[in-house]
Image: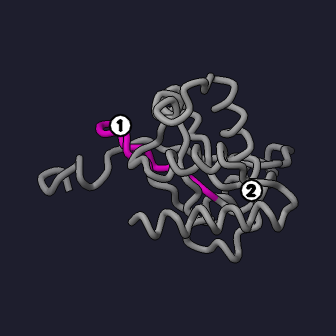
Amino acid sequence: MPDALEASLDRAASLCARRGAQLTELRRQVLRLVLESRQPVGAYALLDRLKASRAGAAPPTVYRALDFLVEQGLIHKVERLGAFVGCVEMEEHPEDCDCGAAHDHPHQFLICARCGGTTEISDPGVTLALSRAAAAAGFVLARSTVEAEGLCAACRGPAEG
C-alpha cells in the first residue's frame, strides 16, 4: 500500500505540473492524509493529523490546501458530511483524468447512514437524467454532485440483503 500511495501522489504531482500548478509539500501531505483515510475526513481531523509533522499548522493552511486539491480534481468534498475523499477517477484513470476545476467526469456518492463509509460512483446515466430534468425545468446545469444515503453491504449484512 505505501508504494501505491506514493505512486498516486507522484501521479497527482505530474497532473498538477501538466496544468501549470504545483503540488507543494504541504498540499502533498494533505492529499496523503485524505488518501490514507478509509472514510471521508473533515478539515479539523486533517489539521489534527497534520500538526504531528507541522506544529504551526492552522485551519486556513488546511482549507487552502483542500481548496487547491478540489480545484485540481484530486479530491471531492462530500457536502453532506463536510468531509473530503480522494477522487476515484484520478486514482483509476489518472492518464484520462483532466477534470481540474471543471471536474467534468460524472460522480455521485453513496453514503452509509450507519458507518459513514462513502463510495464514489461514476454513472453517466445519473448525470444525463439530472441534466434532462433540469432542461425540462428550463435550467442549465453547470455542475452537480449527487449524494445518496442508505446502507452499505457490510452494514446491511446478509439478513437485510
The residue to which callout 1 is attached is 113
Q: Is residue 43 magenta?
A: no
Q: Position of residue 154 (x, y in %)?
A: 23, 53
**Pointer 2 or 1: first along the chain:** 2
Look at label 2 and name its amino acid: His
Looking at the image, which residue is at 54% across and 26% down? 55
In the current view of this chain or complex, which residue is farthest to the bottom?
95
> Quick one: 40 or 26, which is closer to the camera?
26
Q: How is the image coloured?
A: one colour
Q: Position of residue 157 (x, y in %)?
A: 17, 52
Give the percent coordinates (x, y) of residue 46.
51, 34
Helix, strand or loop at label 1? It is: loop
What's the amino acid at mark 1? Answer: Ala
> Mark on residue 145?
none
Q: Nearer the viewer, mark 2 or mark 1?
A: 2
Does residue 88 sit above or below 40 in this rendering? Answer: below
Which segment is the magenta one?
107-118
39 sits left or right of 21 in the view: left
Residue on which the image places disc 2: 103
Task: Give coordinates of residue 78: x percent, y percent.
Answer: 56, 40
Residue at (59% x, 35% y) in the render: 79
